[in-house]
Amino acid sequence: MSALRFTSFVSLGLLAAAQTPPTLTQRYDFEDPSNRVSLRHRLDEASGLAVTEGGRVFTHGDERAVVYEVDPETGTVLKQFSMGAPVLEGDFEGIAIVGNRFFLINSQGLLLEFKEGDNDESVPFAGVDTGLEDRCEVEGLAFEPAAQALVAACKSDPSDDDEGFIVLYRIRLSDLAVEPESIRVPEAGLEAFGLSDHFAPSGVEVDPETGSLILVSSRQESIIEITAEGRIISGFDLGSNRHPRVEGISILPDGTLLLADERQRGRAHITTYSRRPTPPANDP
């Protein structure tokens, strides 16, 4: 091989490495949270998190269709609004926000779409049966800009064919129909990160910077990052001391990561992880 070709290959390899975004565990130090606040008793079962384009944070409980705007720095509830009069009840497991469109999903795959309401307002909503009830128990919802779709995570193994896989489904925003092809993540990839060979998602988020999907598991007290195609690229054991029952995850516009834990010992919490500074590029 000529010196010129060898130099070209090396240069291309260095360029590809420089363009590879840092992984989740490189972006955040999960042993060093920047803030942790308690939530009020009405959010003892905080079950999902979502952030608007302007950085406002919303969460919900898992028994009634009530949405709360919270201040992640103090845990203060800024307002709340609901769906239905009386308030719709159900096992609500995820929230997502796309522009002025709000979505809640329950464990049976019923998707509610609505607009933000004023404090104590009951807002109208449209319900869509995604058909996911026949495929899995849903727990977690996020917006994936690249696919223009919502991503719903499956807590339980959907079928015998999916045993040994973490499974997610994309729901197209254009018609709120579930795409026939699921995202199947081999659980065998968890071992490389020192995690259990089973992972039951309790929340999902899409990193706006990298496009990767981030999943948390309350049962396994861990967090993983996967590519849009379903390959595990990083993972971390959060531990019961830090996150005894992690249910919600979202990312602020400045890259700050938020994790919400349901009440386990004492109050429910929102924990904040600041993004590590991007190291300067090496001089050529």
Image: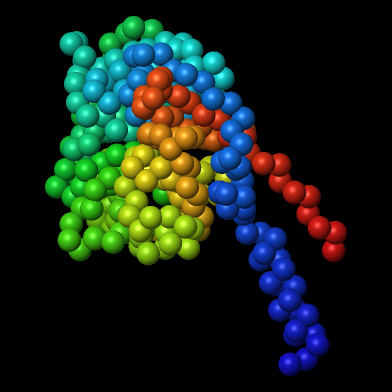
Residue closer to the observer: 190 or 58: 190
Percent x, y of residue 134: 14, 47
* 137 on left or right of 256: left
- The percent position of residue 280, horizontal first and vertical second, equals 78, 50
In the rendered view, would you say 156 is above or below 117? below
Residue in the picture at 20% in, 19% down = 88
**Drawn side of residue 179 relative to residue 55, left or right:** left
Residue lying at 22% horizontally and 43% vertically, measured from the top left: 137
Res 115 visible = no
Residue 186 visible in the snapshot: yes
Q: Residue furthest right?
A: 283
Question: What count of labels does the image hold?
Answer: 0
Q: Nearer the viewer, residue 94 or 179?
A: 94
- Horizontal and vertical percent for residue 33? 59, 33
Give the image location of residue 139, x and y in percent. Answer: 29, 39
Q: Quadrant of residue 111?
A: top left
Viewer-proximal residue, 221 or 163? 221
Q: Would residue 191 appear left or right of 28 to someone viewing this image?
A: left
